[in-house]
Amino acid sequence: MTKRKTILFVAMPDSIHTARWLEQLHEQGWDIHLFPSTLITALHSRIRQVTVHHFLYDQMILQSDTPKNLIVSLFERAVYGILRRGLGQLLFVWRAKQLAKVIARVQPDIIHSLEIQHAGYLTLAAKKWLKAEFPSWIVTNWGSDIFLFGQLPEHQEKIRLVLEQCDYYACECQRDVRLAKAFGFNKTVLPVFPNTGGFELNKLEKVRRQQLTSTRKVIMLKGYQHFAGRALVGLAALALCADVLQDYTVVIYSASKPVLKAAKLWTQQTGIVIKIIPQGTAHDDILALHGLARISIGLSISDAISTSLLEAMVMGAFPIQSCTACADEWIEHGVSGAIVPAKESEIIAPWIRKALSDDELVNHAAQLNWQTALARLDGEMLKQKTINIYQTVMQ
């Protein structure tokens, strides 16, 4: 009897990006395994039909046929916290050994690291423990893995070693292909397309057509304020446009704590309504809000292709996106969107004003972006591209 092809993913188990990627493989008959690249507090509810391995021990803890949460015991969590604070490198080595044991036992045909700074580094360390021939290794670049971390001296050598040791490299941007080659990668670059999968365009077209972009009275703002996100700059830019926002509702989603505090002050100062979308809101609900938005703003100092940019394009909102997220590979500045500096509210504000005043601009941009979506973001098309990757590597 022919053994089923086996793929071992090393990835963040609670990530929607991990879940959406794995969903594309459900019907292929492959044996799918997942080794957590980070502390496993919960398995994302959309991860199914996957054998999940413990993040510390060499054992299988769940064969996921239905959505379930994985709760780490209080003891395990306490031990992990102590080790991470006091013996971080020792813990990393321990986990790399456990991953090596899983690889030796499962004997996957392919190992796929989804993200570099956790999954890629961990897989690299596991490879050093295994003296036997290592399976084909795919590394996927997420977000800022190379664009930002590649600029930091403490990460440069690690990134170089990952790219030297892996066999295939996948990413969302042609920019990151160039960066990987600059780090010395000289093997196979896989097709460049979004890591988060595509969209059900037939269903979403009905939603986006309910309101012409120029008639919409919502402004969406991605609320990340962290190592990369710059939502506070977006709020500052909107404050500069307060005189033309009186008839609009500003909607903030994925809001970090500093943004929640700033939003209250912003409302007090401007008198304009801000609606905060709770964390954990369903993806379909966020998409529907983009379908009500005239403008969608996403700002960060580093990203690959921003999922929120793609959502705005699909749903007909005029995207205002920072220049650090490969936006230039998807939209034309001043025509189908605006590409702006991530940290300069004085430059962003005029584009908000223009998108609010120019009906022809936003309606034409919506048409152009829909054509781009049809060509590049259809879910079934991207699913087949994903499947083709593994079929090619397994040959």
Image (cartoon, rainbow, N blue to C red):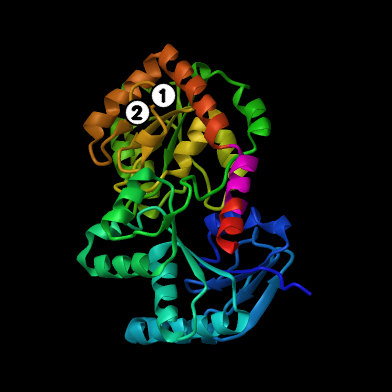
Residue 354 among magenta residues: no
In the image shown, does 210 or 328 lie closer to the viewer? 328
Image quarter (top left, top right, bottom left or bottom right) of the N terminus: bottom right
In the image shown, does 130 or 213 lie closer to the viewer? 130
Residue 58 horizontal side relative to residue 261, left or right: right
> What segment is highlighted magenta in the picture?
378-387
Q: In the image, what residue occupies the spot 38% across and 42% down?
A: 263
Mainly helix, strand or loop, the magenta region?
helix
Q: In the image, what residue occupies the spot 65% across and 42% down?
A: 380
Disc 1 vs disc 2: Cβ atoms closer than 8 Å?
Answer: no
Give the secondary structure at mark 1. Answer: loop
Image quarter (top left, top right, bottom left or bottom right) of the C terminus: bottom right
- Judged from this view, the residue extending furthest toward the front is 395
Q: Residue 11 in the image: state x and y as whole percent.
A: 51, 66
Give the secondary structure at mark 2. Answer: strand
Q: Is residue 159 above or below residue 220?
A: below
For label 2, the residue is: 338
Q: In the image, what residue occupies the spot 55% across and 31% down?
A: 375
Q: Is residue 146 above or below residue 271?
A: below
Amino acid under disc 1:
Ser
Image disc number at residue 336: 1
Neighbor class of circle 1 (other Cα within 10 Å; few <14, some 14-19, many 20+) is many
Amino acid under disc 2:
Ala
